Amino acid sequence: QDAFAIYVTNARTYPTTDAQGVYLRGSDAVSVALASAGAIQSIPTDPANSGNFRYRYTAIDGSTYTLTYELETSAIPGKSAGQHQAGP
């Protein structure tokens, strides 16, 4: 989320996607935009990194974004296993 905050501060908009969003892999357009802008050096991936266990980023108009992720377990205090979302 810090990388997106840095990016929007400089670009005045979040990187945009279509309604389905993109899985952040490091080589996708959003990851490349973040790295090219100096907002992040490398894109983190989910430890499982397959199926639903990947980070999906969606920002249709660039004014906000949704980062969707799936937790494999309930080991993080206050978070249950399953799908979660984060944003600015």
Image: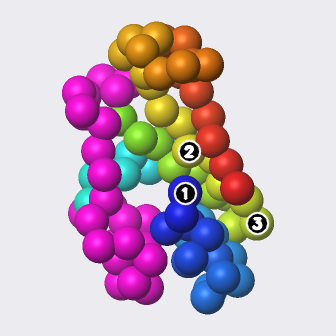
Q: Residue at x 54, y 36 (%)?
A: 68
Q: CA distance from mark 2 to mark 3?
A: 14 Å
SS assignment at label 2? strand
Q: CA distance from mark 3 to mark 1?
A: 15 Å
Q: Residue 67, which numbered label?
A: 2
Where residue 65 appears, x then y in whole percent?
66, 54
The three-letter amino acid code for the residue at tag 1 is: Gln
Which residue is nearer to you in this view: 20 or 80?
Answer: 80
SS assignment at label 3? loop
Q: Does 38 appear in magenta?
A: yes
Q: Does 58 appear in magenta?
A: no
Between circles 3 and 1, the one closer to the viewer is 1
Where residue 46 appears, x then y in whole percent?
31, 36
Dot placed on the residue nearer the N-terminal end, 3 or 1: 1
Magenta span: helix, strand or loop, mainly?
loop
Left/right of residue 61 with respect to residue 21 in the rendered view: right
Q: Residue at x 55, y 57 (%)?
A: 1
Q: Residues within 10 Å of mark 1 (few under 14, many from 20)?
A: few
SS assignment at label 1? loop
Between circles 2 and 1, the one closer to the viewer is 1
Are the residues at dot 2 and dot 1 in contact (C-beta closer than 8 Å)? yes
Dot placed on the residue nearer the N-terminal end, 2 or 1: 1
27 w.r.t. 76: above or below: below
Left/right of residue 65 with respect to residue 15 in the rendered view: right
Q: CA distance from mark 2 to mark 1?
A: 8 Å
Q: Which residues make up the magenta segment?
A: 27-53
Where residue 66 appears, x then y in whole percent?
63, 46
Which residue is nearer to you in this view: 41 or 51?
Answer: 41
Q: Name the residue tied to disc 1.
A: 1
4 w.r.t. 73: above or below: below
